[in-house]
Amino acid sequence: MPFDTRTQPLTPAQARVLATLMEKSRTVPDSYPLTLNSLLAGCNQKSSRDPVMQLDEAAAAQALDELRQRALVVEIGGARVARWEHNFARGAGVPDQAAVLLALLMLRGPQTAGELRINAERWHRFADISSVEAFLHELAERSDDKGGPLAVLLPRAPGARESRWAHLLCGPVDVQAAQPQGAAPASGALQSRVEALEAEVAALRATVEQLRADLGLAPPPHP
């Protein structure tokens, strides 16, 4: 059965636990697989997390058990304490590079392709932004027989230079809630001012063209 988050989306706790395991497998391989205590510390760290969460041991253990049932994590029995590792790339059927991008989106929230490339530096070195975008588009265009899309390109926020990407592992994205803080649609008053200025510029251009014609001047060359 394909990994389909449209019918079985991850909970926020499951996504944080899974992505933390994915992160630590790349950034601290000597400490990996993780014990429950180490995993909990990673889930609740305040840096490189959006949103910051405060999971307790019971919530993390429950998320691990649910992820294990979906073949996304594996328990490794130890002599003294159990350890955990992720199985995301195989369980979800995505390339390792795509798994890196999804984990970053789960941990840090929506990001541009450029931000993802920078934030992935310790995990995987992408050659350029185009290679990041190629994997993101592949995730966004994932076919229904493979379980459907796992990422989406969000509408560009007002004032932003680039659009951001979000993951779909926890279900559809609330576009309004995903906007950066402080970003808001242009007000009606601002829109009216812009339209008035555009009309004024058009009138000035018409006046200049008429003056040129009256003086017998040639029209300016097109840029």
Image (cartoon, rainbow, N blue to C red):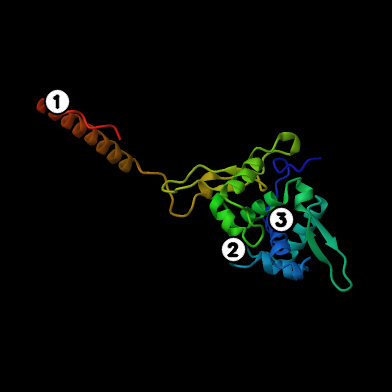
Quadrant of image for the N terminus: top right
Between the C-alphas of marks 1 and 3, the distance is 71 Å
Considering the numbered disc 3 on the image, is that residue within a helix, a strand or a loop?
helix
| Percent position of residue 129, x then y | 57, 49
Q: Earlier in the sequence, mark 3 or mark 2?
A: 3
Label at residue 122 = none
Considering the numbered disc 1 on the image, is that residue within a helix, a strand or a loop?
helix
**Residue type marked 1:** Ala
| Percent position of residue 217, x then y | 14, 29
| Percent position of residue 143, x then y | 70, 35
Asked whether 37 or 152 is in front, the reply is 152
| Percent position of residue 46, x then y | 59, 67
Quadrant of image for the C terminus: top left
Label at residue 213 = 1
Give the residue number, with chain letter if any, for mark 3: 14
Residue found at x 27% / y 36%: 198
Name the residue at the bottom extreme. 80
Give the residue number, with chain letter if any, for mark 2: 48
Q: Earlier in the sequence, mark 1 or mark 2?
A: 2
- 220 left or right of 17 in image: left
- Where 39 falls versus 170 (above or below)? below
